[in-house]
Each structure stands twice: as C-alpha cells, then as structure tokens.
Amino acid sequence: MKRRQFLQSPLLALAATGTAWPGAAAADNIRSYNLRPAPTTVNVVGRRWGDTDVWAYNGRVPGPVIRAVQGETLVARVDNGLPEPTTVHWHGIRLPHGMDGVPHLTQAAIAPGASFEYRFPLEDAGTYWYHPHASSSEQLGRGLTGALIVEEREPIRIDRELLWVLDDWRLESDASVREDFGNLHDRSHAGRIGNTVTVNGGLAEPTPVLPGERLRLRLVNTANARVFGLNFGDLDVHVIATDGHPVEPHRPPAGRVTLGPGMRADLLIDVNLSPDQQAAVVDDFYRSRAYTLTEFTAVGTPVRDQAPDWSRALPANPLSVPVLDDAIRHELVFTGGARGGMHGAELDGEYLDLRELARRGKFWALNEVVAHHHHMPPLLTARLGQTVVLDMENRTSWHHPIHLHGHVFQVLGRDGEAATPVEWRDTVLMNPLERVRIAFVADNPGDWMFHCHVLEHQEAGMMGVVRVEA
C-alpha cells in the first residue's frame, strides 16, 4: 500500500473517526450540536450476516463524535425519537448539577417526542463520552453511546490521532439484538457481557500505520459490562491520560491497558515497526477467552528512523488537589452478587433477606443499603470545598468500575499499597475482594450519582448519592 492509498484507506476511516462531523462550528465560544436518539438499522457485523435494528444517535453507532476545545461552552439539543423516556449523561465532564442527565435526580427524563437543551462549559480537556441514564442497561445495550473529545488549547505534537470506541453486543445468529435485558443472571453475576466486540461500531479490521509515526490513540470503553485488557505487546506505548486527565507518561505494565466500563485512556504509540510488519493488539482480560482485537500493519515508507523527541506530557487540567490532612473520611463496603455471601440488606427503609431482594431483582448493596431509584438519601454529605477520602472495600466475587458524577478523584492506593503514578479518574475498577482508597475535593454542589458502571449491577442495587452542600 502506497502512502496515497494509505491516506484514502477505509481502514483508516474506521480507526480515525475522531474528525469533527458537520454542523459543529463554534461561534462566540459556543459549540452547538443536535442529537436525536431513535430506532434505526445499521450494519454491525458485516454484510454476510445482515443489518441490526438498534437505537442510535443521529442514525449512527456509535453516535457522532462531539469535538470542542477546552474553554468553549457545549450546547446540545436532544430530540427524543425513542419510544420511551431518555436523558444524556456526559460521562466524566465536570458540569452544573442540572446538566448531568440523571432522571429524577438532576432533571426530568425527556419524554418521547420532547426535547431538552444541555448547556455547560468545558473546563477540562480530555477524552469523554455520552450515553443515556434512563433504562441504562437496555438503552446502551441497543447502541446509544458516543464519544466526546475536548481538545487542549495547546495540544502536544503528534502525527495522527485515532479513536477507538470499544463496545460489545449480545446478538442472535441473525445479527439481531438479543432481547434478554435485565435478566437475573446478568444482574447477579458479571453483567451483560456480549458475544460480539466492535470498534467504532463495526468488527475491527487491521489498522494501517506508517512506520515511525507517532499516534495518539484515544480509547473509550462503552460496553455495559465487559472489561477490556488490551495487550500491545512490544509496541512502543505510553499512557498519557486516564479518564481524560493527564498522567505522568509511562509504559503500561506488561504492555497492557485495562479499561472497565466507562473508563478511558489516551496513549501515545511510536510505531516501531518495519514496512509490512504487523503487531497484534490482544484483549486478554478474560484469559480463557483471549482474542486479537486488531493488528497494526505498517505500510509505506518510514517517516522517521526513531521516536521523535517531542514532549509526551499533556498540559494539566484545572483540578482541585485533595488536602488529606483536612479530609473527611468514609468507609464504603460493596456486597452482594452470586457467591457473595450477603444475607440481606435495607431497601426503602425495610430490611429484606436475600430471597426477597432477589425476587425484586436486587442483588447488590452499598453499606448494606440497596438502591431502588436515583433519588434516595445520600451516602455521605460534604461541605463545598472539603476534601473527601473514601476507603472502599469490594467484598464480592466480581469486578466493579465505580463511577462518581460531577467530580474527579485521585486513586491513592490499593490494598494498602500507594498508587504510582497518581491518577486522576472518574471511574476506578475494583477487583474482587480488593480495597481501594480515593480522594476528591467536593467542589461541585448538588446530589451526585455514585455507582457501579456495570449497568446491570447499578440497576440491581449498587448505587448511591453523594451530596455536596454549598
């Protein structure tokens, strides 16, 4: 493949869907978009198997890539074309409470045929995404996801940017979506893990690259429950951001980048391949089910002989650093699930045994309380500006990506070991029987959702509210 063919390659289009879509011109520092979630038909698994009926934003899976520049204001008008209410949550964005997209907690759900306008400033650069928070497991499982990229005012130097929106689908043999949403097995076990993995809405194909070029790869895990463990092998890879926020550039341990549902990572890849050489990217998180996600295929004449000496460090976002000496501290214990040993918990003020909870589709508890709806008494209350330290213990047999709305936290340590390097995150993956300590500054007033981003776990009780009082 020659350079001109490479630049025109449909495989490049698959990998580089980070380009802005029409209608997103910025005016007066405002970036405006229109989103219409609605049923449609797309091809997910290739023409051999036919098309799939999905729910999608603007007829696309994933939805259009929203791009803006740090400091701009995003205005997104959402026209609901679905047969049921919906919202849009802007995952990872620090925004005003009324714009967070959680029904009954921050806004009324958008009824079928109705509209809602979201408007909020983009304080932080980074890789984010958007999705519904109404009937979340089903609406995301039918395809309602999309990437949101906030570019740095002064971006680092690269040759090219790639975006991989990772997802998985539970499909029947005719490529239709399996209609078993919310079943009790998914709720009590690992969640709705699909049987078909996609990148940017389709089956991944080989990714053409130029020998010697420097790539910025933005990864977004939009799956309901699947954890991705992407092993880049001997490729020259550095992690430069986690959940959108800069981190000290470092090589991922053993070349592997792990992303629970909702999590993101920005990587710099220096293509240390010779022409016609390939390097596989293997998803081996579930060791007995490892598979090759894609292959980087080096084509054309090398653009340089060695990695450039350009800086890998991203400019910092304006985050409030936790002051641990003055922190308030809370312990949060996650229990439940299959093989979890939970005997019962409180639901709507009443203690119920496990059998009765299961009859109501509830299997998980947070501090022995089972969430029933978004509007509930807070787990904890902090004053505006206070530092909060959360000691979290996962007493279950399952992985839980724990997500805090409206804030960003530092991961301080795991199982008593200090975290290095220190990462800013909005979602942290807790391993089975693991303890994780995080800290954040309660600098955004309101009642904020705090939950497991395995969406079936959230709907089956693993959720709470963090209140920040002005």
Image (cartoon, helix red, strand yellow):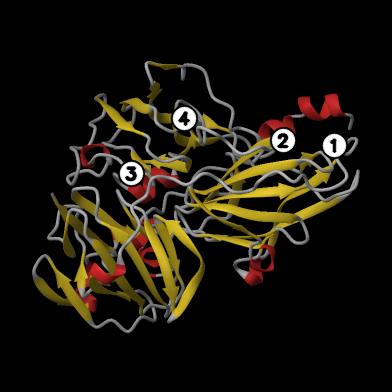
At x 24%, y 32%, the residue is: 110
Percent position of residue 388, x then y:
26, 64
Between discs 2 and 3, the one toward the N terminus: 3
Mark 4 residue element? strand
Distance between the Cα atoms at labels 2 and 3? 30 Å
Rendering coords of residue 9 (x, y %) = 77, 29
Assign a secondary structure to mark 2.
Answer: loop
**Do residues under tags 2 and 1 come within 8 Å of each other at their CB atoms?**
yes
Per the image, the residue denoted by label 4 is 69
Query: Is 151 situated left or right of 93 in this image?
Result: right
Amino acid residing under circle 1: Val
Q: The residue tagged with tag 3: helix, strand or loop?
A: loop
Badge 2 local density, few (<14 within 10 Å), some, or many (20+)? few
Q: Position of residue 118 (x, y in %)?
A: 29, 30
User: Which amino acid lies under the numbered mark 3 shown in the image of this protein?
Assistant: Arg
The residue lying toward the viewer, choosing from 57 and 250, is 250
- The reply to whether dot 3 and dot 1 touch (C-beta < 8 Å) is no
Which residue was labeled with disc 2? 159
Crowding around mark 1 (Cα neighbors within 10 Å: few <14, some 14 to 19, many 20+) is: few
Q: Which residue sits at x=22%, y=74%?
A: 367
Residue at which label 3 appears:
94
| Vertical arrangement, residue 307 with respect to residue 401, above or below | above
What is the three-letter code of the residue carrying label 4? Answer: Val
Residues marked 4 and 1 touching at CB (< 8 Å): no
Image quadrant where residue 428 sits = bottom left
Tell me the SS state at disc 1.
loop
Q: Of the numbered discs in the image, which one, if any, rests on residue 303? A: 1
Residue 353 vs residue 317, the one in the foreground: 317
| Residue displayed at 48% across by 27% down | 59
- Residue 461 visible: no
Res 437 label: none
Mark 3 vs mark 1, CA separation in Å: 39 Å
